[in-house]
Amino acid sequence: MALMSFRNVWVEYGDKIVLERVSLDIHEGSFVSIIGPSGAGKSTFLRLALGQEGPTKGEVLLGGEPLRPEPGPDRGVVFQRYSVFPHLTVLQNVLFGSECAQAPFLGKLFGSKRRQAREESAEMLASVGLGDSLNVYPAQLSGGMQQRLAIAQALIKRPRVLLLDEPFGALDPGIRMDMHALVTDVWKAHGLTILMVTHDLKEAFALGTRVMAFDKRRHDPQAPHRFGATAVYDVTLDRKEGANRPSESVPDAALPALGSR
Amino acid sequence: MIRLINLHPTRGSGVLLGVLPLLLILLFYTGASAARHAENTSDKLLPTFSQMVESTGALVTRTDPTTGDIPLVADTSASLTRLGIGLAIATGSALVLGLVIGTLPLIRSTLGPLVGVIAVIPPIAVLPILFITFGLGEASKIALVVIGIMPAMIRDLSAFIAQLPQEQIIKAQTLGANSWQVMMRVALPQALPRLISIVRLQLGAAWVFLIAAEAIAADVGLGYRIFLVRRYMSMDIILPYVAWISLLAIIMDYALVRLSRIAFAWAHEGAR
């Protein structure tokens, strides 16, 4: 069964249709890259998966259950910016998740619970390469380091789906390569399901086991807002390990067409 | 020739440049005062520094026979108590209300417009109402300070909290935070340094309302004293009192800056 399903989903803002007839399944363990021109509803699609907004029509299911239209701990997220809390140190940022669950009122853990949570968080930070910066504030970290922190922070909750919204868009090319390696590693190590929105075609194909392109199928020159976007290409790349599912058959012709966009 | 906009003072010359206008004003005053006294030895408008020391010194060294207090000390303590209580009430309420208005859309829709309406009422215009309801005692003066500064504080703080990046609020929810935890652990800690700067901004207004209330109905206080001696044109007391009030304001402002830098180092990272 699919981990996440979108069943004939429409998203409309007033009379503007952003997404129309989006029907697709996301399988556990897949790494889905989402590409498309600006304004084609990539981010709206991600917000649907996140629960930041609900569909106007249709259903979004997670593990067979309809998704409540609000974010929850089963879906982790890393945004391009502002993903970490500036008033908490690196370690406190990662501890936040454990503290919310185990200390609902005070937000502070004590004794053995505290020791265990700290160890777990420190380990997670070490695994993303932040083991030496536990007690600094995010403002003292570089952009790449802040994104590493945001990833560690999300992973500590063991989310069923990790959503990445242009996570490397603001980073230098060199740093970006390191981050690709890191994301691929954590995806394999934690058996994650990842949805990633990106502007970078190469990145989409290098990382994903499946690449979806969002765009409008139809265009009305008199009323461009009346047609919404949907997944116009959906390519599964079967050459990667980590994908639990055999690839669905996709015409090879889709690839060059996508590349020339 | 380097452009004027690119000429920066060094550390030392910067301090010197800052002190220069103050020195010039003092110098000008001394000259003007001496000139007036040369013409009329009993001039009251521009008292000399020795006259100020003498008259104001009497308010520090001699006790008031009717109350048994030293006037300057009694005035300062009465004014600071009123100001302190007023600031504490206004700051505390602004924090609580700013937090709920800033984070909870339902409360924002309910209380936001009300705060907006109250904020446009000129506080001095409600002073008669305060005197009628609270009497002429301490409560009405404290109430004026509170009403004078609180609406602006609530508006500023709630707007600041509402403008925290949406990404942070969503991230907190994906980490398992409920509404309470988002308020207490994401919004509150980030609002506190802002609250301190809001208090600093409103400190001037708080003094204005305090002195206005004391001028109209009080029997002790810094504002009371300067309006009392105004009847005798005692510039030799008014000027040192104004300087003393300014010094108190500067000390309070500096203390708030230090507090913010020590307690919320993370908020000042970028400014280093």
Image: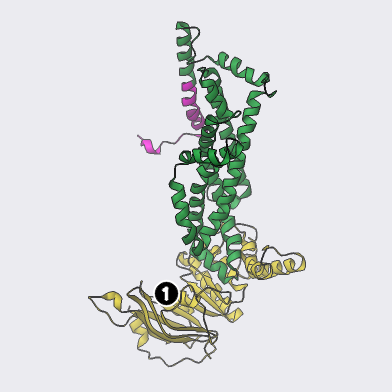
Chain colours: A yellow, B green
Left/right of residue A35 with respect to residue A69 in the rendered view: left
Q: Disc 1 sits on a residue from what chain?
A: A
Q: Is residue B94 part of the magenta span, yes or no?
A: no
- Residue plotted at (56% across, 28% down): B224
Q: Position of residue A110 (x, y in %)?
A: 74, 64
Which element type, helix, strand or loop, lies under badge 1? helix
In this rendering, does residue A82 appear at all? Answer: no
Tell me the quarter of the image containing the C terminus of chain A: bottom left
Write the residue at 36% across / 86% down. A254
Residue B43: x %, y % from top left: 48, 11
Quarter assignment of residue B245 = top right
Image coordinates for residue A154, horizontal then vertical, percent = 58, 71
Query: Could you say which is closer to the camera, residue B192 or residue B10?
Result: B192
The residue nearer to you, when weighing A144 against B40, is B40
In the displayed structure, B26 sits above or below A138; it is above
Secondary structure mostly taken by the magenta-highlighted segment of the chain: helix
- In the image, farthest residue toward the right: A111
**Position of residue A113 in the picture relative to residue B185 (left or right):** right
Residue ID at (64%, 63%): A91
Find disc 1 in the rendering and name its residue. A44
**Chain part drawn in magenta:** B1-25
The percent coordinates of residue A149 (x first, y second) are: 58, 66
